[in-house]
Image: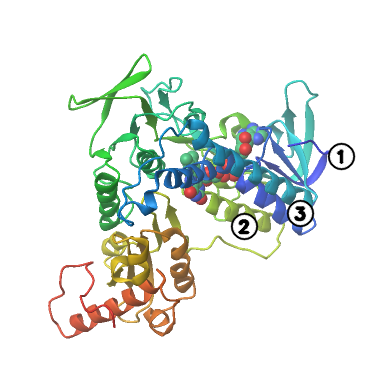
C-alpha cells in the first residue's frame, strides 16, 4: 500500500484493507464519498489474500495437480505425487496468485479514487483516528463515519505453544520450508479439514484430531460422513473423533501429541486449526462505548452499526460466519446504511457455504438437521454423480446432489452438493432458492449434456417419486438413497 497525499478529513475512513474493508470503501466511493483506507500491512487483501482463502485454495489446486489426484484410478494408471517435488514447487503458484490479487485490489482502490494510508489505526475519539507507522510521523484523520474491518487472527487454545516449523497455525503454516512426511491436524472444522485433504493429496500421512464426533459438525450427518469416508478411504487420513489433546511436546524437528485416553501420536508437523479472535482489542473502541465480546468480536446491530452511531464494523471482526464472501456484503450494507444510500439494505439470507476439502462440499438454504429440529415438513430428492454421464467421465462416483423441499408446495428449501464442482454448482441451487423456485424449475429446465448440473434434474425426479410413494402411503425406502429408476 502506498500513501496517498491529501487533507485529513473524509466522509468515510475504513480500517483494514481485507475484503470487507476494500468492498465497503469501494461502495462508498462509487457513490461519490471521500474515502480513506488505513491498512497496517504493506500489502492489501488481509487474511483472504495473504493467509487464508486464496493461499489455501491455491495450495489445494497445486496439490491436485502435482498428485494427479483427479485422474487417480481413472486411466488405469495409478498416478502419485511427482517425485522430488519441493516446497518451492508447491508454493510457487500460491505466490503468483497472491501477487495478481494485490494488483487487482490496488487497481480497484485507484479506480475509485480511494486514499490509502499505511499504518496502525487507533481511535482517539469517535471522530478521530491516530495512525502510527514506524519511521513516519503520526497522522490524525477525522471522518463522519468509520468502518472497522480489521479481521481476526488465529489464537491457539490455552496450552498450545507454536514452535518454528513444528507446531504451526494456519498463518505460520504458509512459511513452511519443507513438505512434511507426516502431519497432525488439531481441529476437524473447515480450515483443519481443508488443509488435511490438501497435504494428504500431496502424500503427507495426515492424522486429524477432532474434539467432536463429526467432521465440520454443523453439516448434515450424511455430508460429514461422506467427507470422512473420502478422507479415510481415498486420502488415507486417520481421524480421531471425540478426542481431546492433553499435551503437545516438541522433540527436535518432530512433535508428539498425547490424547486424553493416553494415545501418543508423533509427526513432523502439528497444525493447530482451532480458535480465532477478532482484531479489535487495540483499537481503543471500548473507551468510546463500542461493545466487544470475550473473543474481541465487535457487537453490531442488523445494519452493522456498533453501539456508537458513526462507527460500523463488518467482516471477521464481528465473528460468525467469518467468510470473505459474507464480509464483503456486510461492509457494503454497512456503508449503504451509514450514508442512507438505499441501494443495499441487508445481506442476502440465502448464503452459499462452500468447503474446499477433497471432495468439495457446498450447502445453501436449510439443512436437514435444522428442518428436523424445527419440526418442519420436508422431503428429499437425491441424485448421485455416478448415475450421470459427466460423473462417469470425470470418475467422480461418490458425489451427489441433495435437494430438500417442502412437500406441499415443492418449494426448494435447501441444497447440498458433495463432489467435483460442488462449490460452483451450488449457485444454481442458491438462485432457485432465492427466487423461491420449486422442483418444477429443475424438471422443466434443459441442462447441458453431459454435465454435473443435470444431477439437479434427477434429484428433482427422485424427490417427486418419494413424494408419490409418501402420498400413496407406501413405506419410503432408506432415506437419502436415490430411487433406482432415477433416469426418468
Ligand atoms: C485458512 C483459511 C481459509 C479460508 N477460506 C475461506 C474460503 O474458502 N471462503 C471464504 O469466504 N472465506 C475463507 N476464509 C475466511 C476469510 O479469509 C476471511 O473471512 C476474510 O479474510 C475476512 O475479511 P476481513 O476483511 O473481515 O478481514 P481480514 O481479511 O482479516 O483483513 C483485515 C485487515 O485489517 C488490517 N488491520 C488489522 N488491525 C489493523 C489496525 N489496527 N490498523 C490498520 N489495519 C489493521 C489487517 O492487517 C488486515 O489486512 C478462510 C480463512 C482462513 C484462515
Identify the residue shown where x is 48% and y is 65%.
427
Farthest top residue?
252
Circle 3/circle 1 CB separation < 8 Å: no
Q: Earlier in the sequence, mark 3 or mark 1?
A: 1
Q: Is residue 289 visible?
A: no
- Give the residue at mark 3: 29
Q: Tell me the SS state at disc 2.
A: helix
- Give the residue at mark 2: 333
x, y percent for residue 191: 41, 41
Farthest right residue?
6
x, y percent for residue 85: 45, 34
Q: Is 372 situated left or right of 433 in this image? A: left
Q: Tell me the SS state at disc 3.
A: helix
Name the colouring of the figure. rainbow
Determine if the C-beta at disc 1 is less than 8 A from ligand 1: no
Identify the residue shown where x is 80% and y is 57%.
32
Against 446, is 168 above or below? above
From the image, state whether disc 2 or disc 3 is nearer to you: 3
Amino acid at each position: 500500500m502506498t500513501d496517498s497525499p491529501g487533507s485529513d478529513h473524509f466522509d468515510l475512513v475504513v480500517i483494514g484493507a481485507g475484503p470487507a474493508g476494500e468492498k465497503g470503501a469501494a461502495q462508498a466511493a462509487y457513490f461519490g464519498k471521500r474515502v480513506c483506507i488505513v491498512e497496517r500491512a504493506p500489502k492489501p487483501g488481509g487474511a483472504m489474500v495473504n493467509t487464508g482463502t486464496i493461499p489455501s485454495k491455491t495450495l489445494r489446486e497445486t496439490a491436485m495437480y502435482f498428485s494427479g489426484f483427479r485422474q487417480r484410478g481413472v486411466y488405469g494408471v495409478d498416478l502419485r505425487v511427482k517425485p522430488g517435488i519441493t516446497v518451492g514447487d508447491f508454493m510457487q503458484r500460491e505466490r503468483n496468485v497472491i501477487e495478481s490479487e494485490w494488483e487487482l485490489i490496488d487497481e480497484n482502490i485507484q479506480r475509485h479514487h480511494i486514499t490509502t494510508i499505511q499504518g496502525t489505526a487507533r481511535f482517539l475519539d469517535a471522530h478521530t483516528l491516530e495512525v502510527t507507522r514506524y519511521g513516519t510521523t503520526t497522522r490524525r484523520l477525522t471522518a463522519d463515519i468509520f468502518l472497522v474491518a480489521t479481521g481476526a487472527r488465529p489464537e491457539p487454545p490455552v496450552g498450545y505453544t507454536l514452535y518454528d516449523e513444528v507446531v504451526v497455525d494456519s498463518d505460520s503454516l504458509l512459511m513452511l520450508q519443507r513438505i512434511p512426511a507426516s502431519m497432525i491436524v488439531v481441529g476437524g472444522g473447515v480450515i483443519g479439514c481443508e488443509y488435511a485433504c490438501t497435504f494428504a493429496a500431496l502424500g503427507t500421512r495426515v492424522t486429524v484430531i477432532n474434539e467432536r464426533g463429526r467432521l465440520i459438525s454443523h453439516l448434515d450427518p450424511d455430508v460429514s460422513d461422506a467427507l470422512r469416508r473420502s478422507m479415510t478411504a481415498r486420502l488415507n487420513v486417520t481421524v480421531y473423533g471425540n478426542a481431546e489433546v492433553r499435551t503437545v511436546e516438541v522433540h527436535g524437528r518432530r512433535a508428539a501429541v498425547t490424547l486424553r485416553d493416553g494415545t501418543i501420536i508423533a509427526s513432523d508437523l502439528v497444525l493447530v486449526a482451532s480458535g480465532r479472535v477478532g482484531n479489535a482489542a487495540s483499537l481503543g473502541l471500548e473507551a468510546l462505548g463500542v461493545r466487544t465480546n470475550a473473543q474481541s468480536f465487535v457487537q453490531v446491530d442488523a445494519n452493522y452499526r456498533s453501539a456508537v452511531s458513526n462507527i460500523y464494523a463488518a467482516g471477521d471482526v464481528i465473528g460468525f460466519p467469518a467468510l470473505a464472501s459474507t464480509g464483503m456484503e456486510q461492509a457494503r450494507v454497512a456503508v449503504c446504511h451509514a450514508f442512507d444510500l438505499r441501494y443495499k439494505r441487508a445481506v442476502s439470507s440465502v448464503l452459499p457455504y462452500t468447503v474446499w476439502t477433497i471432495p468439495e462440499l457446498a450447502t445453501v438454504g436449510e439443512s436437514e438437521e435444522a428442518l428436523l429440529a424445527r419440526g418442519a415438513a420436508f422431503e428429499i430428492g437425491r441424485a448421485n454423480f455416478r448415475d450421470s454421464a459427466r460423473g462417469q467421465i470425470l470418475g467422480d462416483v461418490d458425489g451427489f446432489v441433495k435437494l430438500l423441499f417442502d412437500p406441499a408446495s415443492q418449494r426448494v428449501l435447501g441444497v447440498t452438493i458433495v463432489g467435483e464442482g460442488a462449490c460452483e454448482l451450488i449457485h444454481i441451487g442458491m438462485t432457485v432458492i432465492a427466487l423461491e423456485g420449486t422442483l418444477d424449475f429443475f424438471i422443466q429446465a434443459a441442462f447441458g449434456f453431459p454435465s454435473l448440473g443435470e444431477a439437479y434434474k434427477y434429484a428433482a425426479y427422485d424427490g417427486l417419486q418419494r413424494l408419490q410413494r409418501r402420498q400413496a402411503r407406501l413405506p419410503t425406502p432408506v432415506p437419502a438413497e436415490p430411487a433406482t429408476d432415477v433416469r426418468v
